[in-house]
Amino acid sequence: MGDSDAEPTPGEASQPQGSPPLDVISEGVGELGLVIDPEVAKRACQEVLEKVRQIHGGVSEEEEPELVNGDTDNTGPPPEISEEEVALAGPRNTVKSARRRQKNNSAKQSWLLRLFESKLFDISMAISYLYNSKEPGVQAYIGNRLFSFRHDEVDSYLPQLLNMYIHMDEDVGDAIKPYVVYRCRQSINFSLQCAWLLGAFSSDMHISTQRHSRGTKLRKVILSDELKPAQRRRELLPPVGPGAEHSLSPSKRTHQRSKSDATASTSLSSNLKRTASNPKVENQDESSVSQELTSSTDRLDNIGSSPVRLAPQREFIQSLMGIGKRLATLPTKEQKTQRLVSELSLLNHKLPARVWLPTAGFDHHVVRVPHTQAVVLNSKDKAPYLIYVEVDLCGGSGVWRLRHHPRAESQQLHQCSVRGLVCGDTGAAASPFSHPSPLPNLRLSSRPSPRGLVSPLGLLLSPSPAGPSLPLSFSPPSLRPSLHSLPSPSLTTLFSPLSFSTLPSPSSPFFPSSPSSLTLPSPPSSLHSLPSPHSPPSPLFSPLSPFSTLPSLSPSLSSSPSLPPSPPLSLSPLSLLHSPPYLSPFSPFSPSLHSLPSPHSPPSPLSLLSTLSLLHTPLPHLSPFSPFSPSLHSLPSPHSPPSPLSLLSLSPLPLLTTLLPLSLLHTPLLTLSLLSSLSLLPSLTSPFSPLSPSPSLHSLPPSLSSTLSPSPLPHHSPPSPPLSPLSPFPSLSHPLSSSLLPEIHTNSCDNISQFSVDSITSQESKEPVFIAAGDIRRRLSEQLAHTPNTFKRDPEDPSAVALKEPWQEKVGRIREGSPYGHIPNWRLLSVIVKCGDDLRQELLAFQVLKQLLSIWEQERVPLWIKPYKILVISSDSGMIEPVVNAVSIHQVKKQSQLSLLDYFLQEHGNYTTEAFLTAQRNFVQSCAGYCLVCYLLQVKDRHNGNILLDSEGHIIHIDFGFILSSSPRNLGFETSAFKLTSEFVDVMGGVDGDVSDCVCVQVMGGVDGDVSDCVCVQVMGVLDGDVMGGVDGDVFDCVQVMGVLDGDVSDCVCAGLILCCKHMEKDKDLEIMQQGSHLPCFHGSSTVRNLKERFHMNLPEEQLQVLVEQMVDGSMRSITTKLYDGFQYLTNGIM
Amino acid sequence: MAQVEKKAGLLRKSSASKKPLKEKVVLMYEEIFVREDPAKNNPRFWEELFLMKVNLEYLEGKLESLDGDELMKVKDNINSLFQHCIQALGEEHQIKVVNALQTLCALFRGVHQKNKSTSGFDIINMLMGFDKAELRMKDLMESLDTLLCGDGSESLKSLCLKLLLCLVTVTDNISQNTILEYVMINSIFEAILQILSSSSSRRQHGYDTVVLLALLSVNPYIVKLSIVDDETTLNGKGLVISQALSEYNRQYKDKEEENQGGFFSTLTTMVGSMFIADAEEKISVQTNEAILLALYEAVHLNRNFITVLAQSHPEIDLVTTPSAPVPTTPTAPLGTAPPSVDVMSSTELPLDPNLQTSNLLITFLKYSSIVMQDTKDEHRLNSAKLCLIILTCIAEDQYANAFLHDDNMNFRVNLHRMPMRHRKKGADKNIPSRPLVCAVLDLMVEFIVTHMMKEFPMDLYIRCVQVVHKLICYQKKCRVRLHYTWRELWSALINLVKFLMSNETVLLTKYNIFHLALLVINLFNMFITYGDTFLPTPSSYDELYYEIVRMHQVFDNLYCMVLRLSTNAGQWKEAASKVTLALVNIRAIINHFNPKIESYAAVNHISQLSEEQVLEVVRSNYDTLTLKLQDGLDQYERYSEQPKEAAFFKELVRSISLNVRKNVSLNTLSQDVLLKEFSSIS
C-alpha cells in the first residue's frame, strides 16, 4: 500500500505501460501489423501517460489540451480505414468530462492502474471493467489493452465485446473498434465471425434504429471487404486469385471452387493454356470456365463490387443454411434425408473451395462433403442436420499443393509431351498423362476398385508418398480402344479372378529370375519418338493413337526396381523370395531370357511386358503353356525394328494377354502397375482381386511354404499360420488395399480367417473339401452377435445410427472411401447446421460452461462438462459443433429398449469390470457437472432427447434454448433444481448404493468450514488483485480434499458451486449480454439477480451442503421431472 | 415409307403451287447442275445463293436423281458449292451460315444416297476433290467448332449438330463412313462436350449431343469419351439421359393411367394398350435406344460416369437453381438473385414434397422395368438386352456397388410391375425406402418371374441371373448384409428351374439350358456355402434350407435329367455333368433333411408340418450335415463387349443410325420455321 504511492513516477510507469502494446507488434503480427500498430502503440502510451499524470494531480490541468491534441493527431483512424470511423470529436469531449471525475478519485485510479498493469489482469477482468467502468479513459485503455491479449482469449469474449459495441454508449464502442478492425484485417475468419455476430446482435433492435446502428455499419464495412489488409500476405491470408476469378455470381452459383490460391500458379497454367495444343480441353478447365462465367456475370449483374475475400465462405455457409431452410419444408424424415444427401452432393461439385468450418479450432479448408453420411437430426418442425466434412489442414503439404502445383507442373509436362520431349525422369514422364485438371483425378481416385489399381502405380512411381503422384492415377487415355479393338478373347479371362485359381503354384518365388533383368531402364529415346495422345492429328491418328500411350508402362515398370526397398511396394522383398531350387527349370529357357531387351537395345514397352511374361512362363507347373514359348521367341524384341509403335502394331497383345495371367500371379506388383496403366478399362479394372486376397490365392500347395520366407513387410503383424505360405501376397496387397482399396466393410483380418476356411478349395488337390453346415450357420450368428453395439436403422430417426457409430470407425470408413483420404493432413469434421433456431443463447451457455469448466479444471474438481462450440450466424441460424460418440438418452432407450443401467451394463460390461466402473465414474462426474449447470443457469426443457450419453458414459446436456428465466411455453414444469431421475441414480449405484451414500457423507466430511470464507475473501481478492495467490491455495486445498474423496454428485456439486461463487465475477458476461438483448432468457428483470442468488455467495459452507443435499434429494424425487418426461413422451415421443 | 410419301407430297405441293415461276434458288441450283461454272456469268453467284432460302427437297432430290456418271460431270461445280458452303460458314451474316449448313446437309445426304454402291473415296472426290478433301474438311470442322463454341444463336448450334448427325449417319454402317475419318482427325469432341457442360445449351441441344456422342463412339472417339472427367460435362450427360428416360417413363405412366381410368374391362385395356402402345411406343423406344446406348457407353467406358449414376437431382439444373430460391440474408449486400430464366428448371420443383428425390440410376431402373415387360418385338428385346448389359456393367463396378449397397442412400423405387392374373397391381405404394440394390434385385426377380414363356428369352435370363450373381459376389466380398427378402429370389429361381424342366424338350432344341441351370444352382450354392458372409440373419439361412427342402421335387427332377443326359454321350453331356456336380450340396441338404422331417412328423404324429416346425427340424440338424466346398462360386466372367457383343452393338448402332437419319431429315425440314424467324431477326 505504502509503496504504491511512490511508485508511479512518470518514467517508471510509462515503461511497463508502453510495453504491452509494443509487445503486440512483435507478437506474431508480423509485417501486417505495421500499418496499425505504431499508432496503436503510441496511442496506448499516451493514454497511459495521461493517466499517470492525472494521478499525479496538478500537472494534468496545464497539459491537458496538448495531450488532447496529441490524441487527435496520432490516434486518428489509420489512413486506409476509409469509412467514417472513430468520431474524433466524441472522445475529446468526453475525455474532458472524464478528467473532472477522475480527479476526485485519483487514489482509486492508481489502484486501478496497478490492477491493470498486473499480470493478473486478464481478459475477463478487462471485459468486466470495460462494461462497468464509466470512465472513457479506462475504457480507452482497456480498448488498447485488448491488443495485448492472446487472440483466442479475446475471441472467447467476442460476443460480449460486440454486444457492448452495439448496445453501449459510444465511448465503449470507440474503445473496442480499433481492435475489431485490426483483427478483421488480419483474419477472414474473424471478419466473418464479427459480421455474423454483429448481425445477430443487432437484429433485436428496432428496425429503424438498426439501420443506423453502429453495429450494422461496422458489419457492412466488414462485409464490403474494405478491411482487407493493405499488403497482401499469402501466408496469413488465404490467398485469393485475381479478383475476377473469384468474384461470384450469387445468383448462379452458391459458391465455386476457388480455383487457385496461388495466383502465380494460375497465371502459369493459364499461360500454358494458351499455348496448349488443344485449347478446348483447357477450356473445360474449371478456372477458365469460371473466368468466363464471372466475366459474363460481371457484365450482367454488375457485381464487380462483390466482396471477394469473404465471399466463398459466406456463400458456403449460406448454401448450408439454404439447405436447412428447404429441408424444413419437407414433411418426412426420409424425404429430408434424401433431400439433404442430394443437396450436399450438389454442394460437393463446388468443392473444394476456399471454405472452412468456423467451428473447428484449426486452419483448414473443406475438400469434400461426404454427402451420404449426412443425417437429419430429430426436430419437430425445424430441420437441423449433421454433416461431416473432409478437410485438409492448412500449412502442410495439403491438397493445395496437390491440386495447384501439380497442375502447373503437369501442364508443363503436358506441353513437353506435346512437343515430344518427355523427360527421362520417371515421375515426370508419367505425369504428362495426367489430365490438365487434376481435381477430377482426385475424384477419380475415389472410385473404389479401380483406384486400388490405379494408385499403386502412383505409389510405385513416386519417390514420396502418394500425394504428388496422384495425377498419375490418370492412366493413359487411349489404351482402352487398343484393347477394345484387339481380337483377344482372353482379355476377360486375363483379369478375371479365375485365372488365379487356375495357376497351380505361387509365383512369387520365381518372380525375378535375375535382378539384372529387372533393371530395365526407361529409355528416354524410345519415348521421344512416341507420339503423345495430343500429338498433331494425322490420318494415321486412329490406328496409332490407341497405342501411343503405352509408353507409360515402361516408366512404371522400369521405375519400380529402382525404388528403395523400404516402401511396401518395392519389389525387392519379392525378389528375396526367389528360391534357387526353382530356378533350374529356367535353364532351358535361358536363350529366351538372353534375348530380352538389354539396357542397350531400345526396349519397347511391350517388349518389357513380354519380358516379364517370358520370365514367368517357363515354370515347371505351367507346362500347358509351353506351346507359347516359341511364339514368345518370335515376339518383337530388340532385334525387331526399334520403333515401339511398329512393335505394337505387330499386335503381340493378344499373345500378351494369354501370357499375362501367368505374370499376374508371379508379379503382383508389376502386374499391378501394368494393370494400373491399363486400368482405364472399366471392364478390366475393378475385379482385380489380387489386392483383396482372393481365396484362390490361398489355395496353394503347402509344400511351398518352406520356400517362402514370411513377408518382410507384415502389415498385419502376425500372419496366421495357414497363411504363412502366402504371406507375401496378403502383406503386399494389404498396404495397398488398406489405404487404397475401398473394401469398406471388410475387416481384413476377418477376411483372412474367413479365407482360411475358404482356401481349402484348390484345383490341385482334387479331393473335395467338406464343411459343416452347422459351422456356416454358427459363423453367421456369431458374426451378427459381434455387432450388438450398432443401432438399427430407423427411418424416423436417421441420426441415431450415424451418431452411434464410433467416431474413429466413421473417420476410417469415410477416409477409405474418400478421394482425398490419402492426404496426410486429411481430417474429418462434423458440424450441425441449425436453421431457424436462435443460437445466441446457446452461445451464452457455451461461454458460461467453458468458464465453469475452466474454473473446475483450475481447481481440479472432477466435474465434467462438455461445452460445445457454437457459431452464431444470424439471429435465427448457426452452427454447432457436435459432440462425437454421443447419442441422446432418448435414442439409447428407444433403440436398446433397456433401462439406462442395463444399457451401461451392455455397453461397458458387468458391474465389477473396469470399463463399467470407469463409465460409472464418468457418468457421476458429468451428471454432477451438469446438475450444477442446470441449477445455475436454470436450464429447462430437460427431456431425454436433450441429454446425450457418450461412449465413455458421460452425459452431456444439449440445447440451452431455455435458460435462466425462460422455459418451454412457461408451463411451469421442471421446478426442480436440476434433472436427476431415479434412472440416473440407478446408474450411479442406486439410492442405497455406495455412491449415493457418499453423497451425504462426503459432503459433510469433505468440506472444511472455512472454505466459504475463503471464497468470500477470494471474491474480494479478485478486486484487489494481489491477495489472490494466497487464498487460492486454501481453496485449492479444500477442494483437493473433496476431490480425493469424491465420486459423488453432491460433493462435486458443492465444490463446484463454491468455486463458482469464487469466480462469479466472471459471470459478468451474462450481464453484458443482457444489454440490449431480447433473448428470452433475459426476460424478467430479476434474471441476473436471481442468478447471483443462486450462487449463494453468503451462505456458510454447512448450509450450502444442506442446500445441495436438498436439491439433490428434491430433484431425485421431483414429480415435475417425471411429469415433463411424460409430457415429452406423449407429445413428441421422446422416451 | 410414310416419310417418303410425305416428302413427295410436300414436293408436289410446293412445285404445284409454284409451277409457273420457279423459285430463284431452284434456278440457281439448276445452274450448278450444269457443267459450266455458275460464277462465270454471275460473279456474285455464290454470295447470292447463300442469301437464298435453301430448298432442301429440290437439292437432295436432284442429287439423288443423278446417277454416278452424271454427277461426275458436275463434280467441279459441286466441289465449289461445297467449298463455298464452308466459306459461308465463316460469314457474319447468320442467314448465310444457316443456309450453308443446310446446303451441306443436303449435299452429304444427296451424294450418299446416290452413291450407295460406290466407294467412299468417290464420295469424297465428288464433294470436295481428293486433293482438297483434307483441307476442306478441316475448314468445315473448324467452322463447326467455332460455331458450336461461340455465343452465336442457339439455332445455329442446333443446325451444326444436325449437320454432324447427318454426317455421321449418312451411311448405314458407320464404319463405312469415310468422311467420318476427317471428323476424327479434326476433332470437335471438345466442342460437343462443351455443350453438355453448360446448362443452357444442354437444355436445347443435349439430346442431339448425346445421340451424336453415342454414335460417334464406335470409333476412336471412345478414347476421349472414356477419359472425360469433367464433372459438369458428365453430369450434363447424365441429366440429358435421365431426362430422356424419365420422359419415357412419364409418358408410359400417363398412358397407363389413361387406360386404367376408363371403365373398360381389363381385357380391352390390355388389348387397347397393346395397340396404342405399339403404335406410339415403338418410336419412343427407338429414339431411346440411342439414349440407352449413350448410357451404356458412358457406364461401360467412363469410370467417372459411375458417380453420376448416383448423383441425385432434386434440382436437375445444378448450376442454375440452387441459390435462386434462397433469399440471401437480409443485410447481405449482394445483388438480388435474378429470376431463373430457364424453362426447364421450372418443371423441377425443388420444393415439391411429393417429388421423390431421384437419380439417374433410379430412372434407369424404372425405365428398365417398363422396357423389360415386353420382349416380344425386336426393338424391345434389344432394349431389354441393352438394359441388362448396362446393369451388368453396373453390377461389376466397385463404386457403383458401393453406392448401390450404401445404407445411407435409401430410396423408394417404384418399379413397374406387369399386371398379372395372380397378383394385384398397385401394391407398390408402400415400398420401404431401401438401398438401391434392393431395387435392382427386385427388378431381376420381376424379370425372372414374368418371362417364363414359350419364346424363352434365354439370353436375357442368363444376363439377369449373372447380374444377381455379381451383386452377391460383391456382398460376399464386402460383407454387406443386405436386409432383403431373399426368399422371393429363391422361389423365383426355383420356379425358373421348374419351368426349364417342364419345357425341357422344347427348350433343348434351341438353347443350352444347362448353362442357365448351372448359374441358378451356383447362386444357391453361393447362399449355401457363403451365406454366413452376407445373409442378414441366421434365420434367413434357415429359410434357405426350408425353401430348398420344400421345393425338393424341382431339384430332384433336375438332377434326374442332368444325370440322364450326362451319362448318355450326347450333345449335352459335358454341360449336364457340370450341373450334376453343382447339385451336390443341394442334394445333400435334401437327402439330409427330408428323412429328418419325415421322422419328426412320424414321431409327433403330424401329417402336415408347419413352416415353424420344419424350421425347427432344420435348425436342430445342421451339425450332422456336411457340405462340399465348390470352386469358383464367387468368381465370374467379366463383361466384355468384344467379341461377344460386337455383333449386337453393330446392329444396334446401325438401327439407331438409320433412325436418326430419318429423324434428322424431318427435323431439318422443321428448321425452315426457324429459318424464317431468323431472317426476320437479321
Image: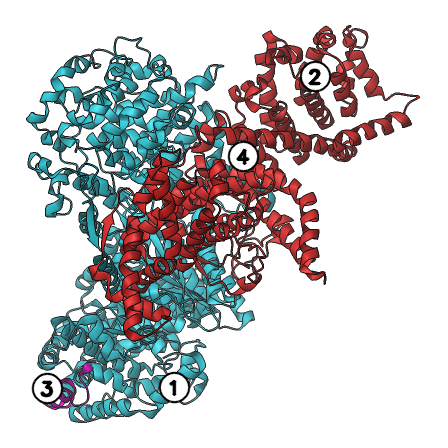
CA–CA distance in space, label 2 to label 3: 109 Å
Classify mark 1: residues with Cα within 10 Å, few (<14), some (14-19) or many (20+).
some
Q: Which mark is residue A1126?
A: 1
Residue B6 spot, x, y in % from top left: 79, 32
Residue B78 location, quadrant: top right
Q: In front of the other: label 1 or label 3?
A: 1
Label 3: chain letter: A
Helix or strand or loop: what does disc 2 sit on? helix
Q: Is residue B633 left or right of residue A758?
A: right
Q: In front of the other: label 4 or label 2?
A: 2
Q: In this picture, which residue range is highlighted in magenta?
A: A988-1008
- Residue that numbered label 3 is attached to: A1006
Which of B509/B49 is in front?
B509
Q: In front of the other: label 1 or label 2?
A: 2
Q: Which mark is residue B114?
A: 2
Helix or strand or loop: what does disc 3 sit on? helix
Q: Earlier in the sequence, mark 1 or mark 3?
A: 3
Label 4: chain letter: B
Classify mark 2: residues with Cα within 10 Å, few (<14), some (14-19) or many (20+).
many
Helix or strand or loop: what does disc 4 sit on? helix
Which of B62/A555 is in front?
B62
